[in-house]
Image (cartoon, helix red, strand yellow):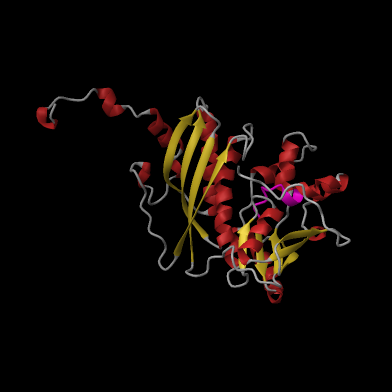
């Protein structure tokens, strides 16, 4: 049949949206911002702010691996966005937008997806960005989500992993171990604790701090796979070793109480992951400026060690002895 023959298509073909497009219109179109083209095209259009360099990062989350299947859907959407925002924070970047692929387990109720989208909407408002596009599918396997985030930074000002120098101090933002202990609390291996559970489910991307560290630090990254392992990444990128003082590690009151009750939790705190704090190398002369940056950003910063000639990470206790760790950190395989 040619287009000019005048035969009308069946009404249902003109009026009924396929299920995927209907789901997108209900839950994700309200999240779309400028450049997303109402999520109606095959790609988005984006013009970065004048004179800025684009920063891009991507992370995936799988049910039973990166979050618990029974976690509230609002927090799953927010965690997905926040772990990617943490990558921008580690580069000193400002958020711009994101692309997201959702693989919902087949049969996921519509109200679950609505709650997932509400969590995203809350964090879009808090962090100042919007969705630009993506894909939505149903999967017979566990729910799987992937997000690609876009940000921007002044040219030449992005914080990098490589660059630490011998004699630099090791700094960390916030507190360490809450995420790993939160997972233990949520799975019944530690007493229930709302603070720890919240830190596991909702990382705190340190965007304001990252943006204030340009010019003050030699190297930076976020801690996602465990403090010791990620410090090893910074040291290896610089061709150096690092010393970490376990007694200087900043702990929240619930984490400190858990460690006091069971000192065997120290390796979990040091290597458990899910911290999403900023780890960075800076010359000792910048210590006061770094503390000022932390105060301006509203987050504590703590010196926890130093970089030196050599290789690997040595973790010491109060007596200067080495703390044995059964594993270095989280592995994705």
Q: Seen from this angle, which residue lies furthest right?
A: 319
- Tell me where the magenta segment starts and ends, as one range: 269-277
Q: Main secondary structure of the magenta part?
A: loop
Residue 102: x and y, percent?
Answer: 48, 37
Question: Residue drawn 54% across and 53% down?
Answer: 127
Q: Seen from this angle, which residue lies furthest front?
A: 310
Numbered disc total: 0
Residue 54: x and y, percent?
Answer: 45, 60
Question: Residue drawn 72% across and 64% down?
Answer: 242
The image quadrant where one finds the C terminus is: top right
Q: Quadrant of residue 227?
A: bottom right
- Res 195 visible: no
Residue 49: x and y, percent?
Answer: 42, 63
Question: Residue drawn 49% across and 51% down?
Answer: 149
Q: Is residue 90 above or below residue 167?
A: above
Task: Identify which residue, 186 or 144, lies in the foreground.
Answer: 144
Q: Is residue 194 above or below residue 222?
A: above
- Res 128 visible: yes
Task: Identify which residue, 59 or 191, lies in the foreground.
Answer: 59
Task: Identify which residue, 145 or 254, lies in the foreground.
Answer: 145
Residue 71: x and y, percent?
Answer: 63, 35
In the rendered structure, the answer to whether residue 288 lies left or right of residue 154 reads: right
Query: Is 274 contained in the magenta span?
Result: yes
Query: Is 148 contained in the magenta span?
Result: no
Question: Residue drawn 58% across and 49% down?
Answer: 83
Q: Seen from this angle, which residue lies furthest bottom?
A: 285
Q: Quadrant of residue 331?
A: top right
The image quadrant where one finds the N terminus is: top left
Task: Identify which residue, 176 or 162, lies in the foreground.
Answer: 162
In the rendered structure, the answer to whether residue 169 lies left or right of residue 30 reads: right
Q: Is residue 233 above or below residue 62?
A: below
């Amino acid at each position: 049949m040619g287009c000019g023959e005048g035969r009308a298509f069946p009404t249902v073909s003109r009026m009924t949206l396929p299920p995927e497009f209907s789901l997108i219109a209900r839950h994700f179109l309200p999240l779309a911002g400028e450049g997303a083209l109402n999520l109606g095209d095959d790609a988005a259009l984006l013009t970065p702010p004048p004179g800025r360099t684009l920063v891009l990062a991507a992370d995936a989350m799988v049910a039973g691996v990166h979050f618990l299947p029974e976690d509230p859907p609002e927090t799953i959407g927010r965690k997905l966005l926040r772990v990617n925002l943490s990558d921008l924070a580690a580069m000193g970047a400002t958020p711009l937008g994101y692309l997201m692929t959702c693989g919902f387990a087949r049969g996921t109720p519509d109200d679950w997806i609505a709650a997932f989208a509400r969590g995203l909407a809350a964090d879009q408002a808090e962090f100042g960005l919007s969705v630009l596009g993506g894909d939505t599918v149903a999967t017979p396997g566990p729910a799987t989500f992937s997000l690609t985030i876009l940000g921007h930074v002044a040219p030449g000002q992005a914080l990098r992993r490589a660059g630490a120098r011998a004699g630099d101090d090791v700094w960390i933002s916030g507190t360490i171990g809450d995420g790993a202990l939160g997972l233990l609390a949520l799975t019944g291996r530690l007493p229930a604790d709302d603070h720890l559970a919240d830190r596991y489910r909702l990382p705190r991307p340190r965007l304001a701090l990252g943006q204030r560290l340009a010019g003050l630090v030699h190297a930076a990254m976020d801690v996602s796979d465990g403090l010791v392992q990620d410090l090893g990444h910074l040291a290896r990128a610089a061709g150096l070793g690092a010393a970490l003082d376990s007694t200087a590690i900043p702990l929240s009151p619930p984490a400190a109480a858990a460690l006091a009750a069971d000192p065997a939790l120290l390796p979990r705190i040091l290597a458990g992951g899910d911290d999403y704090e900023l780890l960075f190398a800076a010359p000792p002369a910048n210590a006061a400026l770094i503390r000022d940056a932390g105060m301006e950003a509203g987050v504590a910063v703590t010196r926890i060690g130093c970089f030196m000639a050599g290789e690997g990470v040595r973790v010491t206790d109060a007596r200067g002895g080495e703390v044995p760790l059964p594993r270095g950190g989280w592995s994705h395989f």
